[in-house]
Image (cartoon, rainbow, N blue to C red):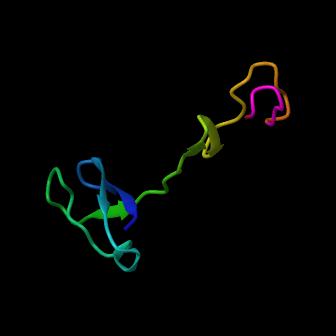
Amino acid sequence: MPIYEYICRDCETRFDTLRPMSQADAPIACQACGSEHTTRAISMFFAQSDGRSVAGSRGSSCSSCSSGTCSTCGS
């Protein structure tokens, strides 16, 4: 079951919860104030393999790289 992130429009609290994909956009109460005036946030995911980022990284992790991909550091 995926984790979805939500933002409460009343108290601006960000929270996440496990929900079936079929309920991703269904109303959900804010965990802080109980309001159902919430909206699903766009979330970025992150994945790594063998200690290296394979998805969700923001640019290069090596200062000598200019192209965003690097054979030296594997980014």
In the displayed structure image, the side of residue 73 where residue 35 appears, left or right: left
Q: Does residue 7 lie above or below 23 as drawn?
A: above
Q: Residue at x 34, y 76 (%)?
A: 23
Q: Position of residue 46 (x, y in %)?
A: 54, 46
Image quarter of the C terminus: top right
Q: Is residue 73 left or right of residue 32?
A: right
Return the residue found at the far top: 63
Residue furthest toward the bottom? 22
Q: Count how many numbered circles sit on residues in the image.
A: 0
Q: Position of residue 8 (x, y in %)?
A: 28, 55
**Which of the 4 quarters of the picture holds residue 74?**
top right
Place of residue 17 in the rendered image (x, y in percent of width and height, measured from the top left): 29, 59
Q: Is residue 34 placed above or below 52 in the rendered structure? A: below
Q: Main secondary structure of the magenta part?
A: loop
Q: Nearer the viewer, residue 24 or 49?
A: 49
Kindly identify the residue that appears in the image at 53 percent across and 51 percent down. Answer: 45
Report the span colored magenta.
69-74
